[in-house]
Image: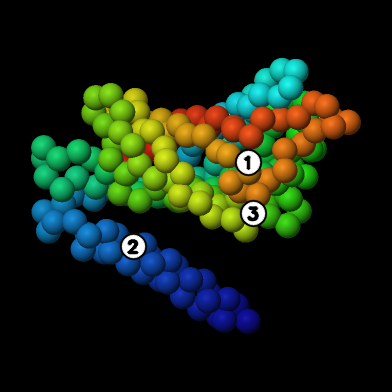
Amino acid sequence: MRHTLESRTLLFMKTHRFARYIVLAGLSLTFAASAEIQQAEATADIRFKGSSTLHGFEGKVKTKPFLLAFISETTNSPMRVSGTASFNVLEMSTGNGKRDSKMRKMLDQEQFSTITGTLTHAELPTIGNSTASLHLRIREIEQDVPVTLSYLERVDDLVTFNVTFNVSLEAFDLKAPSVIGLIRVSDTVEIDCSVTGTLQ
């Protein structure tokens, strides 16, 4: 039994390393042969903001740890980034228990426990901003959402940048919660993601 468990564990470790190799190899083929690819372990602190009939609200959530790939084709070319991040809907908080309960119900947290976003070859600006497309999955619906990247900074092995965008509840077939039909949340929610990655 112990031998079987050790064998399975070894197979899993080999498969995991092979999968990571395949991802990086695929990125290498996408760019020029001289492209430099650096991997980073990352997290993102996400803040979201919306408004309702009477007042606005703000909330926050932190992603699960995820991998980023930073790609530079040449010395003078802009750095690009690819990666997929996700977070648990249950961990989203606005600081108001009743509001949070309605938000999780709207997102159908029991059936769809996570929200996932993917950036692919997005340009990171050294000055100002850049734009890209984020592939966002909420419940069973997937949409490409325009995003703005900014505030790129690198100190030793630490890389930070921001990603901001708006999400339309209607576009993801989400019905905004209301109170006795009078107080209703607006359709647009503003998202601000502060991403931090440690280069490996």
The circle drawn on residue 23 is: 2
Taking depth in this image into account, of 67 and 146 the one nearest to the observer is: 146
Q: Can residue 111 be seen here?
A: yes
Residues 48 and 169: in front is: 169
State whether residue 66 appears in this view.
no
Helix, strand or loop at mark 1: loop
Q: Kindly report the distance in space between the C-alpha atoms of the residues bearing marks 2 and 3.
A: 26 Å
Please state if 35 lies on the left or on the right of 167 as rendered: left
Secondary structure category for the residue under label 2: helix
Q: Position of residue 14 (x, y in %)?
A: 40, 71
Q: Is residue 54 above or below residue 6?
A: above
Where does residue 124 sit, x and y in percent of width and height?
29, 36
Mark 1 neighbour class, 10 Å CA radius: few under 14, some 14 to 19, many 20 or more = some
Which one is in front in this view, the residue at disc 2 or the one at disc 3? 3
Q: Where is residue 43 drawn, in percent x and y? A: 48, 39
The type of residue carrying mark 2 is Val
Q: Amino acid at mark 3?
A: Arg
Q: Mark 3 highlights which residue?
A: 139
Check disc 3 and report its element: helix, strand or loop: loop
State the separation of the CA atoms marked 3 and 1: 12 Å
- Mark 2 neighbour class, 10 Å CA radius: few under 14, some 14 to 19, many 20 or more: few
Amino acid at dot 1: Leu
- State which tag comes first along the sequence, 3 or 1: 3
Q: Is residue 26 left or right of residue 11?
A: left
**Residue at 38%, 67% in the rendered image:** 19
Q: Nearer the viewer, residue 182 or 122?
A: 182
Towards the viewer: 87 or 180:
180
Task: Tell me if label 2 and label 1 are in contact, CB under 8 Å.
Answer: no
Point out which mark residue 169 bears: 1
Q: Earlier in the sequence, mark 2 or mark 3?
A: 2
